[in-house]
Image (cartoon, grey):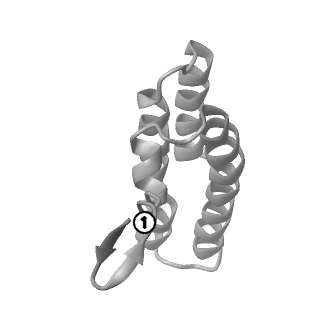
Amino acid sequence: MTKTLGIRVDKPMAPGFFASRWRGEVFLSRLYWRDILIVGSVINLYIGFVALMIAAKGGALWVSAMVHFAILPYNLFLVLALWRTPGRSNLMVWTSLAWLGAATML
C-alpha cells in the first residue's frame, strides 16, 4: 500500500485506453474485433457521413476533407497497436491494413 498526495492507493492505477493498447495489455480479440472492426468502423462511418453532409449542404470542400481525415490518427494508432501486440496472426495484420485503407478512402 502506498500513499500518493495523501490518498491511499491499494493497487496501481489502471492504464488509460491508449497506453494499454500501445503496450499490448489488452486482449488481442478485444483490440481486433471490438476496437478496430466494430467501434472503429462505426466511428468512421459516422465521421464519413458528417463529412458528406457538410459537402452536400454546400460547405467548403476543405472543411469536409478535414472532417473526413480527422479520424486518421486514431485509425493509424489502432492498426499500429495491433501490429505491436504479441500473438497477432498474419490474417489480422492484413485485414487491419485493408480496414485502414477502406476507412481512409471511403
**For residue 27, above or below residue 67:** above
Q: Position of residue 65 (x, y in %)?
A: 46, 62
* Residue in the image at 61% along x and 43% along y: 36
Q: Amino acid at mark 1?
A: Met
Q: Is residue 69 left or right of residue 42?
A: left
Q: Which residue is mark 1?
A: 66
- Residue drawn at x 68%, y 57% is 45
Q: Quadrant of the N terminus?
A: bottom left
In the displayed image of the protein, which residue is found farthest to the top? 90
Q: Could you tell whether 74 is left or right of 88 in the image?
A: left
Report which quarter residue 37 is drawn in.
Answer: top right
Q: Residue 84, position in %: x, y? A: 41, 30
Q: Residue at x 55, y 42 (%)?
A: 26
Image position, residue 17 (x, y; %): 49, 57
Q: Residue furthest front?
A: 1
Give 19 or 83, whichever is nearer the viewer.
Answer: 19
Foreground residue, 49 or 22?
A: 22
Q: Is residue 47 above or below residue 86?
A: below
Foreground residue among 79 and 60: 79
